[in-house]
Image (cartoon, rainbow, N blue to C red):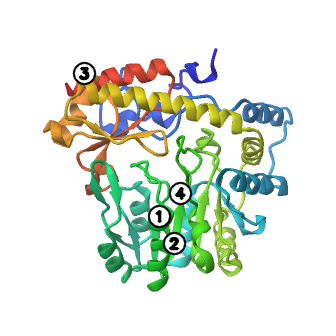
Amino acid sequence: MNLFEQTHDRRDSRSVKWGRMESVYGIQDASGILPMWVADMDFPAPPPVTDALRERLEHPIFGYSYICEECKTAAADWLEKRHGLIVQTDWMLFHQGVIPAMASIIDVFTEVGDSVLVTPPVYPPFFSIPRNLGRGVLYSELTEQDGEYTIDWADFEAKLEKARLFILCNPHNPGGKLWTPAELENIVQLCTRHDVLILSDEIHSDLIHAGETHTPLLSVAGSERNRIFTCIAPTKTFNLAGIQAAMIVSPDSDKRSRLEQHMQAHGTGSLNAFAPVAWKAAYEQGEPWLNELLEVLAHHIDYAVERLEGELPGLKIRRPQSTYLLWIDYRALGFTEDEVMKRLLEKGKVALEPGSKYGEAGRGFLRMNIACPTQTLEDGVSRVIRALR
C-alpha cells in the first residue's frame, strides 16, 4: 500500500493531536471527534529515517549525544540544493525545537520591558513566548484582500520605532503565503533603518507547492545578514516533531557566542540520542519521500478547496503557496466564532483551529490540517460541510 494512504491509529501513542482534544477544546469526550488541528501529519516518517532509528535502537546504550559534522553538512547541502542558500556549518547552533530556540534568542537579545514586533494573524508562540518572558508585544496586523496577505508598511515601520526584535514567519503560518524577494528586502531595509534584529522562522520552508519558490531571508540580506537569526528544522518537513531538533543559523560569531553561553547556562545545548540520527537520515535520504508528499498535498488541497467552496457557498479558501494548512474564510456565512466551533465539534465532530488563536486579525477564519490519508481527508471535509451547512 502507498505509504501516504496507510492509516495508523495514533490515539494510544501519546499524540497531542489525537489525545489532548478534551483539554484544548474544553469538552467532556472527544472519542468521536476527528482532529485536523495541530500541525503534524498523519503520515509515516520517511522509511530511511525509521530505518536509521531502528538501527540506532539495536545499540542498547542511550547516553549523551551530539550533532556530528556529517549532520551539519547534510543540513548545509540540503539548504543549498533546495533553496540555493549557502550556509557555513559554523553558523549553526542546535536546539530542542524552533520554539525553544525562539525563546533563547528573545532572552539573549532583548531585555525585560523591550518590545517584540509580530504581524498577525500568525503562529501563537510568536506573541505568547515574548509575553511570558516579560517583553512587550507590538502588533502590526497584515492587510488581507481575498485571502492574500500583505504588510501595512506604514504601520510596520511605525511599530519598528519601538521594537528591539521582529519575528517573521517565512513561509507564513497560518496563511501559507510565500514572501516575495521584494517584500523581504523591504523588511531588512526597514529593520536596518531602525536597528531592529530579525528572527526568521523558516520551519515550513520545505513544504513549497509546485511552481512556487521559497526565498530564505538570509539570501536577500546582503551586508545586513548579521542582524538575522534563522530557525530551521527537519521536523515539520519530515513529520518528526516528537524527535525535537532544530537549528539557529546566525552568521555573526559574537551573537553565536552569546547564544552558546545562554544554552550552557540553561542546559539546552544538547539533543536527545535519536535527534542526530533522524536529522542526518532525513536530510541525506528524505528527498524522494518529500517530493511524493508534495504531490499528495497538491491533490488534497484541490479536493478540499473544491468540495468546501462548492458545497458551502460563501466559504472562501485561498490555495496556500506552502504548508499543508488551509486558512478558511467563513465570514460570509454569518456565524460567530463560538457558533462555528460549537457546530464543528458537536454537529460535525471535527476539530479545527479557530482563527482568533492567531490574533484578532484571524477572527472569521479556521485553520485546517489536510496532511492525512485520502480516506481521512474525505471524512474530515464531509464533517466540516455537515457542521456548517
Q: Are marks 4 and 1 in contact (CB under 8 Å)?
A: no
Q: Earlier in the sequence, mark 3 or mark 2?
A: 2
* Residue ID at (63%, 48%): 244
Amino acid type at circle 2 is Ile
Q: Earlier in the sequence, mark 1 or mark 2?
A: 1
Q: Quadrant of residue 21?
A: top left
Q: Which residue is mark 1?
A: 168
* Between discs 4 and 3, the one toward the N terminus: 4
182 horizontally vs 258: left or right: left
* Residue at mark 4: 99
Which badge, 4 or 2, is on the more N-terminal residue? 4
Side of 271 where 212 appears, left or right: left
Can residue 43 be spotted in the picture?
yes
Query: Mark 1 is on which residue type?
Result: Leu
Disc 2 marks which residue?
A: 198
Mark number, residue 386? 3
